[in-house]
Amino acid sequence: MVDDNNLNLLLVRALLDGAGYDLAEAGNAAQALEAIDRFKPHLMLLDIELPDRTGLDLARELKANARTRDIVLVVLSAHAGPATEAAARAAGAEGFIGKPIEPGDFRHAVAGYLALARS
């Protein structure tokens, strides 16, 4: 999960820890890129508004790199709407989840995206 808001990180951790997922957290794009080699994620949850670049820029960078292009990317944003979702998909994200997060729907969506990542 890449998000600079600690409350969002805590919420996602609480929702996913109980479901048995391993979760690594990064507060910005640079930290996320550093963690990829150590963690080797199947799925990344990206906030759009990051302090060092946008989550959309990070998505484009990850999809342009042969080493990281197979990571399934899901953009999370409080700016939910068709235009934001279209921008996320244009940047290479396979999914989009609007904030605020509804716990049951969020867990279900993450499970579906993770199944896509493992197929």
Image (spheres, grey):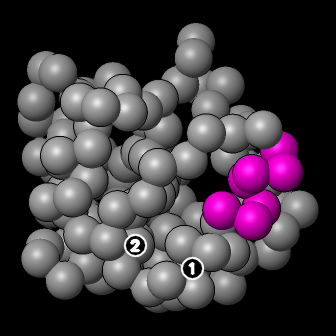
Residue at the spot x=24%, y=69% of the render? 28
Q: Are marks 2 and 1 in contact (CB under 8 Å)?
A: yes
Q: Hey, what amino acid is under mark 2?
A: Asp
Q: On the picture, is 80 further left or further right than 29?
A: right
Number of residues whose C-alpha sits closer than 10 Å to that of mark 2, classed few (under 14), some (14–19) or many (20 or more): many
Q: Up-down: is 109 above or below 83?
A: above
Q: Hey, what amino acid is under mark 1?
A: Asn
Q: Up-down: is 43 above or below 108?
A: above
Q: Up-down: is 46 above or below 52?
A: above
Number of residues whose C-alpha sits closer than 10 Å to that of mark 1, classed few (under 14), some (14–19) or many (20 or more): some
> Residue 48 at x, y = what percent?
33, 74
> Residue 82 at x, y = what percent?
49, 74
Residue 71: numbered disc: none
Q: Secondary structure at mark 1?
A: helix
> Residue 4 at x, y = what percent?
36, 80
Q: What stretch of residues is rendered in magenta? A: 13-19
Give residue 116's quadrant in the image.
top right
Q: Main secondary structure of the magenta part?
A: helix
Q: Secondary structure at mark 2?
A: loop
Q: CA distance from mark 2 to mark 1?
A: 7 Å
Residue at the extreme right of the image, as rendered? 104
Q: Up-down: is 20 above or below 88?
A: above
Does residue 57 show up magenta in the picture? no
